[in-house]
Amino acid sequence: MDFLAEFEAKINLANQSLQKYFVKQENHQAAIYDAMEYSLFSGGKRIRPVLCAACAELFGGDPEEAMPFACAIEMIHTYSLIHDDLPCMDDDDLRRGKPTNHVVYGEAMAVLAGDALLNCAFETALNHSKVSPATTVEALKIIGTLSGTEGMIGGQVIDLESEGTSIDSVTLMAMHVCKTGALMMAAAKAGALVGGGSKEDVLNMEKFARYLGVAFQIKDDILDVESTTEVLGKPVGSDSENEKTTFVTLYGLEQSKKMLEDYTRMAIEVLDEYGERAEFLKGLANFLLQRDR
């Protein structure tokens, strides 16, 4: 298997689907559509929709049937970044190499753009689902739960309350399993469900994505120290400026690199029972291990 070719094909499928599902209206609400479009198509890595499609494919499903849910998750991810960058949160002026949404459109419109993308996510899944109503509802329950107070938003709350204070390893892990890992778990679980996986398969994909999400965050923390703004497309060193506890500040750089490898290995081990069918997902885990942005 040519991993990079498969990866590019899935990214293209995600981008094409987002273009199809996100339809701008040229009316008196045009300004909000412009702000939503700006962040949604600003060059994201599309890891979550790729993960959703790949998990559907693992269990014999059609990746295109996973796309309404994959795109919904990407819209939720994008809204979270818009809000995360706001002055009342991380106060960042650069995202993916471009000015952040509030810098371009103002704080009020950025808040509304994030809100609108959250609504658009569920509209997209409901309006374009190609699977049964029961499966659609179950997939949306997964996405809603893991993007909410017990998932992504809950992780952001821990992050916000932890600024300027030292937190322990248990709190740090809980924060990132929610803040970073939850949407990856949503993508993997929804994909497996739509693809026809069993309850055990869905739980296995949740476990895989939990480990993958932790590894992803550790890599982000390492890059925040070792990379540059030009490569990352966002400010480096912001965690230190905001006095945030990270894997690097808590464990040190070398131990964090070992943890990154360990969590990547644990994620891959979950896939062993699926044999060659899981080759792409194993490749994805290794690709994220080696990424430079």
Image (cartoon, rainbow, N blue to C red):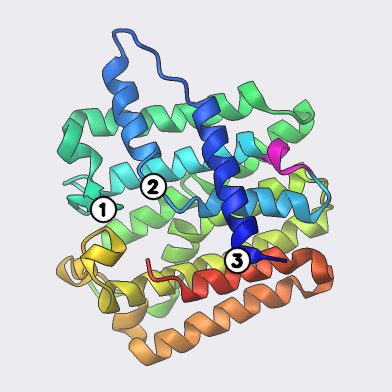
Position of residue 84 measured from the top left corner of the image (x, y, whole percent)? 29, 49
Q: Crowding near pointer 1: few (<14 within 10 Å), some, many (20+)?
A: some
Distance between mark 2 and mark 1 Cα atoms: 9 Å
Q: Amino acid at mark 1?
A: Gly
Position of residue 187 measured from the top left corner of the image (x, y, whole percent)? 61, 50
Q: Crowding near pointer 3: few (<14 within 10 Å), some, many (20+)?
A: many
Mark 1 or mark 2, which is nearer the start of the sequence? 2
Judge by depth and name the residue closer to the eye, 103 or 197. 103
The relative height of residue 195 versus residue 227 in the rendered view (above or below) is above
Q: Crowding near pointer 2: few (<14 within 10 Å), some, many (20+)?
A: few
Q: Amino acid at mark 2?
A: Gly
On-image quarter of the C terminus: bottom left
Q: Residue furthest bottom?
A: 254
The residue indicated by pointer 2 is 43
- Residue 211 visible in the snapshot: no
Judge by depth and name the residue closer to the eye, 138 or 272. 272
- Residue 59 visible in the snapshot: yes
User: Going by the image, does 237 lie left or right of 246?
Assistant: left
Q: From which residue to which does the magenta span run? A: 62-66
The residue indicated by pointer 3 is 284
On-image quarter of the N terminus: bottom right
Are dots 2 and 1 in contact, CB under 8 Å? yes
The residue indicated by pointer 1 is 97
Q: Amino acid at mark 3?
A: Leu
Position of residue 28 measured from the top left corner of the image (x, y, whole percent)? 29, 8
- The residue drawn where x is 42% and y is 74% is 218
Main SS, magenta residues: helix
Mark 2 or mark 3, which is nearer the start of the sequence? 2
